Image: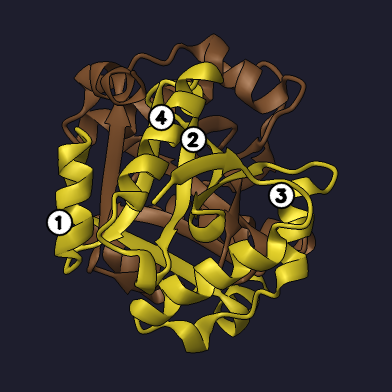
Chain colours: A yellow, B brown
């Protein structure tokens, strides 16, 4: 099989949205998703975009994606790359797609002058942990992720 | 004492950098900081900025800050606010400064049309946990934070 990775382009929103849905489903959070494909087109290719994406294809069929956005590290005082989602469609797992995406993302980060890539991982995801450790990542289990939204956000703002 | 919160403006880089240094020190990570005050000026007020900050003052003296940047949630398909640092100088803690900053940030998030604020917290930080829970935040202890930088990033990119 032939595996290739390319930058996402206008029209890829649907494929990228499908990858994110597969990722949400395999994490048991599909019911929390409100994004539609058009949101991805706008976020990636609209004016003032802070996002980018890579698409992996196996024999020309979309197999996985890496969706990232600009971020800022106060410790470094510099912009960094934040990897929002690394997704591989279930039928294409265990074929090196995730590894290829991560490597292509590292190339893009270095090319753009970013000193770091940051991302989140669920602590129970042994496959992801192995992939990231092999790539040389530091994994910090002591960090919690906090979210404030909807009614709670509006209540606090009142 | 009079507590007020205002948007940061050019020239505040030094005060904001000092707040971040105090935060890094109280987390035991001061040795990892490479940022200088000029980095904050550029990140906040330069062209293509994705960051913003609030400064809390007690009787006119800088007491705390909230540094945030634009982010993107793939599940929501929308931009969200990411709170990079919530800092209160040690001598001004336990006076409601953190709470006031969080509330002002929520107002700014709602005003800007952001559906959510996301941020990280160290799992051992009981004071922060209490503050965030009181504000209505969801805290997810199952998320790990991953970082790839320096030599490891360049090795992967080769």
* Subunit bearing disc 2: A
Residue B52: x and y, percent?
Answer: 65, 38
Q: Quadrant of residue A133?
A: top left
Q: Residue furthest right?
A: A47
Residue assigned mark 4: A106
Q: Earlier in the sequence, mark 3 or mark 4?
A: 3
Comparing marks 1 and 3, which lies closer to the viewer?
A: 3
Residue assigned mark 1: B124
Q: Tell me how far mark 4 sits from mark 2, CA to CA.
A: 10 Å
Q: Is residue A59 above or below residue B136?
A: above
Q: Tell me how far mark 2 sits from mark 1, CA to CA.
A: 26 Å
Q: Is residue A140 above or below residue B150?
A: below
Q: Residue at x 67, y 36 (%)?
A: B50
Question: Can residue A141 be spotted in the picture?
Answer: no
Residue assigned mark 2: A81
Comparing marks 1 and 4, which lies closer to the viewer?
A: 4
* Subunit bearing disc 3: A
Q: Which mark is residue A44?
A: 3
* Subunit bearing disc 1: B
């Amino acid at each position: 099989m032939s595996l290739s990775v390319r930058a996402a382009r206008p029209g890829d929103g649907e494929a990228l949205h499908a990858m994110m849905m597969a990722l949400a489903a395999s994490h048991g959070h599909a019911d929390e998703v409100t994004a539609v494909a058009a949101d991805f087109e706008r976020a990636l290719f609209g004016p003032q975009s802070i996002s980018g994406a890579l698409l992996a294809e196996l024999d020309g069929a979309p197999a996985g994606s890496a969706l990232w956005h600009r971020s800022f590290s106060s410790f470094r005082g510099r912009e960094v790359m934040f990897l929002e989602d690394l997704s591989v469609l279930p039928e294409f797992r265990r074929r090196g797609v995730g590894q290829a995406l991560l490597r292509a993302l590292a190339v893009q980060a270095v090319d753009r002058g970013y000193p770091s890539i940051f991302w989140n991982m669920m602590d129970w995801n042994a496959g992801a942990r192995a992939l990231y450790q092999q790539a040389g990542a530091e994994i910090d289990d002591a960090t919690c992720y906090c979210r404030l939204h909807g009614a709670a956000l509006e209540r606090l703002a009142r």
